[in-house]
Amino acid sequence: MGRIVCLDFGTKRIGVAISDERKILARPLGMVLAGAKFFEELKKLLRSEGVIEKIVIGLPLKMSGQDSAMTTMARSFAEEIKNHFPYPVELWDERLTSMLVEKALSEAGASRKRRAEVSDTLSAVVILQSYLDKT
């Protein structure tokens, strides 16, 4: 049995989450900076996580369900992931994810700096848990 990895795409940071082997729970794995070394760093992060079955990437649709500029970039990012990893890649609707994470962190009293440090990773967890709950 393999695990499912989730990436919360961003232009500066990409949050990473991973499922347990039974594909019931998502947990944070970390954040990788976007840029030239992204794929190398992601491979390092995943190296000790066992068998990977699939990569899920959050798809930032507009509230209307229409594509945005970020949606187009996320789709291109998914194609790049396919070129660097041997796993199937699936896009998953992530509408409201960032807002939910931001609200939860704010209500927990996290500072603005702390929210910026962890929001991408926690968004990946929320996206992956949504995916796990619905599949």
Image (cartoon, rainbow, N blue to C red):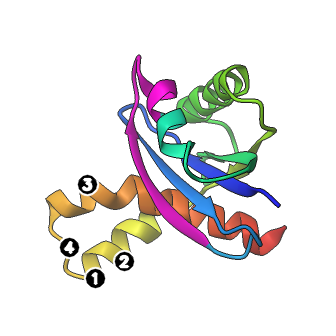
Q: Residue 98: in sight, yes or no?
A: no
Disc number placed over residue 76 in the picture, else none: none
**Residue at x 69% of width, y 48% of height:** 56
Secondary structure at badge 2 equals: helix
Frontmost of labels 3 and 1 is: 3
Pinpoint residue 22: horizontal percent, then vertical percent: 77, 72
- Range of residues picked out in magenta: 26-41
- The residue carrying pointer 1 sits among few (fewer than 14), some (14 to 19) or many (20 or more) residues within 10 Å by Cα, namely few
Q: CA distance from mark 3 to mark 1?
A: 15 Å
Secondary structure at badge 4 equals: loop
> What residue would you read off at disc 2?
104
- The residue carrying pointer 3 sits among few (fewer than 14), some (14 to 19) or many (20 or more) residues within 10 Å by Cα, namely few
**Residue at x 47% of width, y 57% of height:** 29
Left or right for 15, reference 2: left
Q: Quadrant of residue 117?
A: bottom left
- Whether pointer 1 and pointer 2 mark residues with C-beta atoms closer than 8 Å, the reply is yes
In the displayed structure, would residue 135 be above or below residue 107? above
> What residue would you read off at disc 1?
107
Q: CA distance from mark 1 to mark 2?
A: 5 Å
Q: Quadrant of residue 94?
A: bottom right
**Residue at x 73% of width, y 50% of height:** 51
Disc number placed over residue 110 in the picture, else none: 4
Which badge, 2 or 4, comes first in the chain's sequence? Answer: 2
Secondary structure at badge 1 equals: helix
Which badge, 3 or 2, comes first in the chain's sequence? Answer: 2
- Quadrant position of the C terminus in the picture: bottom right
Q: Residue 135: in sight, yes or no?
A: yes
- The residue carrying pointer 4 sits among few (fewer than 14), some (14 to 19) or many (20 or more) residues within 10 Å by Cα, namely some
